[in-house]
Image (cartoon, grey):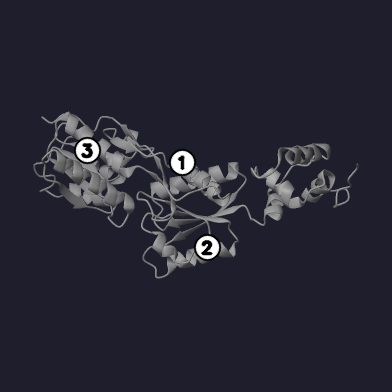
Amino acid sequence: MTVQARSGRGRPSIYDVATLAGVSHQTVSRVINGHANVRDSTRARVVRAMEEIDYTPSPAARALATSRSRRIGVIVDGPMYYGPSSTLWGVEDAAREAGYSVASVAAAYNAPHNFSTAYEHLRAQEVDALCVIAPRYTRADLGAADLPTIFVGAEPQEGAVAAAVDQYAGALLAVDHLLELGHRQIVHVAGLQDWADGRVRTRAYADRMAEVGQTPYVVFGDWRADFGYELGQRLDFPGHASAIFAGNDQMALGLLHAFHERGIRVPQDISIVAFDDIPEARHFFPPLTTVRQDFHALGTLAVRALIKKLEGEADTHTEMIAPKLMIRESTAPPK
């Protein structure tokens, strides 16, 4: 049987495959997208038809057959810190490999209704699903969102699919490293507590300090290197502490700068461990001991979980990635 392409001399379409295989175009779509609810004999017939007319499914054909745009919407927290921006990069790479495009929009936390505005902007672009890389937002902020959604954050969202680096375990790695070196007076320079990451790291620090019989001492920061620098310039800081657990690498960088100016040596006078392992961390002076988060892997995990949800395979749980401690020259036993 010979089938002429509907477009005359153009490339074969999904409808040409369906005609040749004697099935509906919806069945061809299910075969293309790997659905399990297709009989083996039907699947084989469709594949033979595709081969016979040299049909290669394009993203547009997939969208036509499935009534999907094959586009993932991403809402990113307004301040594009290293973590959210690197996670977005991972999302874009993984989506592209899976045949999806990405439409992203930043949502400023302090702007009234900005989150819902960002959501409506993406809905107008007919995205199939939503990825929320916004550590300060929760499921409640979405209101009546009617799209498959995944949250990228540090704490599970009730009734939602989520992906996260295990922040609690990562903070314990940092604190335990200092304890194993012999430090007991450890200050935590915490990140913003309206971020899930900041809350969880602070909680892990406080829990571990209580377990070893030490009083937690927390200074609340805002993630910025400038905050670390200003804190490090205070004559009464770090007091009697022999070590600091900084909530992220940027604040640690500011501390290193200030301590250098004050003649406080790292790690001879005080040890510093931080969190994130930004690419520059190994070039700080001294090179920074820090907890590595694989943000690119986090973005990839989020996309894979979201596509599973689109295909009806996902349940509501949190996919976790293990962090890793990178030991460098900014930590040493106390004098």
The answer to whether marks 1 and 3 mark residues whose Cβ atoms lie closer than 8 Å is no
The kind of residue on which mark 3 rests is Val
- In percent of width and height, residue 182 lies at 14, 30
Q: Residues within 10 Å of mark 2 (few under 14, many from 20)?
A: few
Of helix, strand and loop, which one carries label 1? helix
Residue at the spot of label 2: 146
Residue at the spot of label 3: 175
179 displayed left or right of 109: left
Q: Picture quarter containing residue 269? A: top left
Q: Which mark is residue 278?
A: none
200 displayed left or right of 206: right
**Residue at the extreme left of the image, as rendered:** 240
Q: Reading the chain from its start, which is encountered first: label 2 or label 1?
A: 2
Q: Reading the chain from its start, which is encountered first: label 1 or label 3?
A: 3
The kind of residue on which mark 1 rests is His
The kind of residue on which mark 2 rests is Asp
The structure residue drawn at horizontal position 67% and vertical position 53%, both measured from the top left corner, is 66
Q: Quadrant of the N terminus?
A: top right
